Image (tube, rainbow, N blue to C red):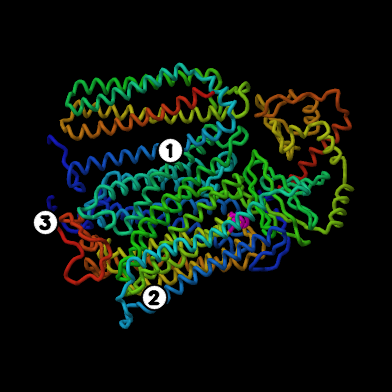
Amino acid sequence: MTAAQSFQPIDPPRPFALFPEATSTLAGQVDAVYFTMLGLCGLVILLVLALMTYFILRYRRGNLRADRTHRWPRWLRHRLEWVWITLPLLIFIAVFVWGGIVYIRIHSMPADALEIHAIGKQWMWKFQHPGGQREINELHVPVGRPIKLTLASQDVIHSFYVPAFRIKRDVVPGRYHQAWFEATAVGRYHLFCAEYCGTMHSQMRGQIVVLPPQEYADWLRRQELGSSLAAEGAALFRSYGCSGCHGANSSVRAPNLAGIYGRPQPLTGGGTVIVDDAYIRDSILLPQKQVVAGFEPIMPSFAGQIGEDDILKLIAFIKSLAAEQEIQP
Amino acid sequence: MAEDSLPIQFVAPAQRNEAVTLAMWLLLATEALMFGALFLSYLIYRLLFPQTFAAASAQLDSMLAALNTGVLLTSSLTIALAIQAVALRRRALALWLLAATVALGCSFLILKGYAWYTEYQHHLVPLRGFQTDYSALGSGAQMFFNLYFVMTGMHALHLSIGIAVVLVMMAYVAWSDRTAMVTRRVGLAGLYWHFVDIIWVFLFPLFYLVV
Amino acid sequence: MSAIPQTGSYLDSGYSLRSWLLTTDHKRIAWLFLLSLTLFFFLGGTAAALIRLELVTPTGDLVGQDTYNRLFSLHGIIMVWFFLVPSIPATLGNFLVPLMIGARDMAFPRLNLASWYLYIIGGLFTFATVISGGVDTGWTFYTPYSSMFSNTHVVLAIVGVFVVGFSSILTGLNIVVTVHRLRAPGMTWFRLPLFIWSTYATAVIMLLATPVLAMTLLLVALERLLGIGFFDPRLGGDPLLFQHLFWFYSHPAVYIMVLPGMGVVSELMAAFSKKAVFGYTYVAFSSIAIAFLGFLVWGHHMFTAGQSMYGSLAFGLLSFMVSVPSAIKVFNWTMTMRKGTLSFETPMLYALGFIGLFTIGGLTGLFLATMAIDVHVHDTYFVIAHFHYIMVGGMVTAYLGGLHYWWPKITGRLYSERWGQIAAVLMFFGFNLTFFPQFILGYLGMPRRYHSYPDEFQVLHVLSSAGAVVLAFAYLLPLCYLGWSLKYGRRAGSNPWGTTGLEWTTSSPPPKYNFEQIPRVDYGPYRYPIVSGTPPTETRHG
């Protein structure tokens, strides 16, 4: 709990402002609809307030000079009703159509986009670049290139929200969601979770780092230079097909391995086991031996198909998942 | 007091009768929407998992359910006749008919209970702590049984309330001389009973006749 | 029809606790609701005050995040189900519906009392939730967080809401039947005061929407208690189904919360303009239209949640449609003032405040129905500001306006006009200072339900919290001077405002059974000017 309390979310420094910056290709379009609505609604409010003020001044009880006779005839009153029913409706429907068109654009995925996977979990955002680079609560993207996000949730509903890009997408567990944006300015922008997701909902925020294309390429390369045992294990985790079941997006129900290293796991038939190197090794080679409670014993054995060195790499990989967990609870 | 006194807010007995009948219909509309939430859920999940729903439906005993449908429809007939008998002041006949209604309602519950027990033995009850086995039915099978047990359970709950109400009506018919009041109340009980029957008439094809 | 011998005012028909707790008099039941609602209002208000205090600093250092999450959940649950939904229907509605239509009580007085007891039982469950540690799901109980992940007392809170839902169903049932069947002779539908029209529309929504909520919450409770995973994605369940069912109730519930307020404002505008409401039939039917259309727009809460794009388009268009009847009301209230004889006593100040705040609230609703904008501002402070303009700026303002207007009738006493006006003005400014900055915060991207937030939002949060201080003070004022008036206020005549309506033909406070003779109504409401000496309605003898 104390560790959770001391955790500081990543906030890009932003100055005080009354209007958010607009740094995606969609942002300007949304703002245009917004300002049109603001203007129209402002007019309506001004009209109502002006009428009210006029009537209040003119027909206040103290004003005996006001003419209170000659009320409007019936037909005129009915006509007036229909004018203020239809006229504002037609104008506002036009704005609705415009807003609908922009909404459809927000939901139409560009064909040539850079695809990035994002996973929301209590309480962090995990990103995976096509090249395998992973990030937590931070997403580096190139400027001027459409980015398509495939979003999934590991637990409850989260919502991926970047105010500067005017995009928001709820991430409902059990299904994939897609969102896209194309950043138009280099900089660091807020990333929020906008759907209440539990204790540390307000800490589930980070930043989108928009880089010039060259710097982005450099950044990607630097990430790859850091490739380690764990990174190689990660590659093996995919090549052996482990991720097919143990991946966060898997359709097969298998234990999620992130963060389990060093922690006790309940077993089918009672008892618990601390997840250590030996247990992981056993689980790969003799999977039916100690099955985690709540899961079916359906994992095939990898005995005879996998060398010890590879097992170590896989263990390092699973360990690294735990390490991430510690840094970013 | 041979007739019931009119409460202060009503000016005529007819006004009161209209008011209570309207109230009963509104209550039934409320109930219908309550079940409506479940019917909507059923519709959505059935569209999501059509094959599974058919396979899961085959696990249920449709003959037993058909028999139960007959039992309930007969009970609707007996309570309708009972209302007539009360209106005609045939007290003994009315009591017999109401007793038959209660007996039929109880038979339904017993048969339904037996069906649930059989399903429990086949590991189909999706309650926490119960062993379940839907492996042969495909994904979404548990959703079918979730719906099945919640909806038939809600229906059984309503039927139990109906039986209790009819028992109270029997007491009125047996011991009360306020004919107008008894006729009004038995009529309302009948409305409720028919409503519970109609819910079952919808449940039966949804759970037992899925193709 | 027979005359009822009068026994003095309803307040004098018994002084024992029993005469109150077992009463079937709609006027006394209104008091029971008024007192318990006030208690819950200040409980929910305390939670709001703590939330605003917490948000003065961006780091979230006053209360922990779990406490904060419990506070906003509690605030929402209490304010929605234990204050706003029953507020006007169960207090003013209960008191006024029989009086306004010329009846001696509600159609089912014992059911009416049962409704209050259900409210109290639901309230006790909510208290139990608070005492045992609270609930942290927000008032929306979204699955799978509420059904699978929250470690708080979700089931207890759900039982509270479930029970109070039946209270609201019974109140609705009583109002619908009473309006249909208990109108005095000659009181045709188009002679009904507009308050009755809107309360009737409210009651219909209560009857048809609340059962869906009850069932939906029951399913969440079943999932938590018995493992029947209706919304569990691991079993193929769909968390969005919960949202559909929840908003099928909760969007109409917004209209449960605001329609009665509109009814009150219609009455107040006529009363203090001394003039019939402009476009009576349009205002009356707009209430029915809101009740009907309100059932077709729930999907606008889910534009970003992954419902189909075309579904969203349809819901968005229908949401624009539902603004039409609201606009009709605003324009007609404004035009009611034309050629009137306006006076600005406390209730009128509330009514004018309502029109301004409700118009802002309603128009910002159009922003949210414009889907491209909604994607950006959904679940931000923009939404918070929008619905507080409707619920607090609208409904609470109308509730207080109505309470002040009918206070002389309810209690037989006059309150201090000066303090009333001070409180009304203070409330208006306090409210705007609290909630207007939240529109700006919302468009900047500040998400709702955040315990801590980035530094640059602090200035606006501090402004908002400062407004909350003013608002809290303004809400405490009526408690003082209205309470004071109960004992020390001057006695009110039967019609202190000089306004129309059957309720003002009875003495203040009204006799136990309202009317000695059931009145006969020969013309519509709002017949101004009242010529002194002739009551606006005649009584038929014999």
The answer to whether marks 3 and 1 sit on the same chain is no
Disc 1 is placed on an element classified as helix
The answer to whether marks 2 and 3 sit on the same chain is no
Name the chain letter of the residue that bears numbered label 3.
C
Residue C536 in the image: state x and y as whole percent: 21, 65
- The residue that disc 1 covers is B34
Residue in the foreground of this view, choosing between C468 and C280: C280
Identified by mark 1, the residue type is Met
Answer with left or right where residue B65 lies relative to residue B173: right
Disc 3 is placed on an element classified as loop
- The residue that disc 3 covers is C541
Q: For the magenta stretch, what is the residue range?
A: C371-380
- The residue that disc 2 covers is A55
Residue C503 in the image: state x and y as whole percent: 24, 60
Identified by mark 2, the residue type is Phe
- Mark 1 is surrounded, within 10 Å at the Cα level, by few (under 14), some (14 to 19) or many (20 or more) other residues, namely many
- Mark 2 is surrounded, within 10 Å at the Cα level, by few (under 14), some (14 to 19) or many (20 or more) other residues, namely many
In the rendered view, would you say A154 is above or below C501?
above
Answer with left or right where residue A214 lies relative to residue C342: right
Answer with left or right where residue C152 lies relative to residue B179: right
Name the chain letter of the residue that bears numbered label 1.
B
Main SS type for the magenta part? Answer: helix
Q: In this orientation, does residue C130 appear?
A: no
Residue C40 in the image: state x and y as whole percent: 42, 54
Q: Residue at x 38, y 29 (%)?
A: B198
